[in-house]
Amino acid sequence: MTTKEVADKFVNLCKEGKYDEAYGMYADNAVSEEMPGVPNNITKGKANILKGFQQWEESIEEMHGGSVGEPMVAGNHFVVPMSMDATFKDRGRQQMDELCVYQVENDQITRATYHYQLPDMGQGM
């Protein structure tokens, strides 16, 4: 698959709410990187990335809305704008806009980096 085909498939799965399938597109040795200042901001390995996503998903009390934009491809990378409006069990309602940058090798996502403004989580970040 081309990077565009990987990007389109990934985005379509996310838009359909099929996040487990979308994360299935990650390579076993993939790396996920959150913003500096976020605890454990670097996660290595597909199994650990999936576990982190599941923990994040379980922390949500109610999802109010969100969006997944169209991918923009450059070489073996693509970027997708995403937004979320959710109430978290431990920190209340938050709205977030982010740019998600993905690196593709051998038809799999090998690296994901997320760029957003850190919300005030009352933890001195």
Image (cartoon, rainbow, N blue to C red):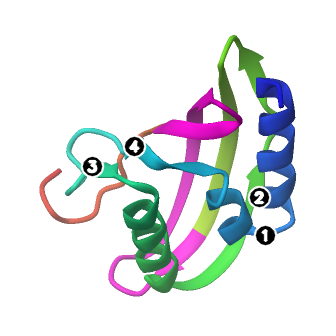
- Residue that badge 1 annotates: 17
Residue 8 seen anywhere in this rendered image of the structure: yes
* C-alpha gap between disc 1 and disc 3: 24 Å
Q: Secondary structure at mark 4?
A: strand
- Residue that badge 2 annotates: 14
Answer with mark 4 or mark 1, whichever residue precedes in sequence. Answer: 1
Answer with mark 2 or mark 4, whichever residue precedes in sequence. Answer: 2
x then y, percent, for residue 24: 65, 60
x then y, percent, for residue 33: 37, 42
Could you tell me the amino acid type at mark 3? Asn
* C-alpha gap between disc 2 and disc 1: 5 Å
Q: Residue 75 colored magenta?
A: no
Range of residues picked out in magenta: 86-113
| Cβ–Cβ under 8 Å for marks 4 and 1 | no
Q: Secondary structure at mark 2?
A: helix
| Cβ–Cβ under 8 Å for marks 3 and 4 | no
Q: Which mark is residue 41?
A: 3
Answer with mark 1 or mark 3, whichever residue precedes in sequence. Answer: 1
| Cβ–Cβ under 8 Å for marks 2 and 1 | yes
x then y, percent, for residue 38: 25, 51
Answer with mark 3 or mark 2, whichever residue precedes in sequence. Answer: 2
* C-alpha gap between disc 3 and disc 2: 22 Å
Q: Nearer the viewer, residue 102 or 58?
A: 102
Q: Residues within 10 Å of mark 1 (few under 14, many from 20)?
A: few
Q: Is residue 94 above or below residue 109?
A: below
Could you tell me the amino acid type at mark 2? Cys
Side of 37 where 74 appears, left or right: right
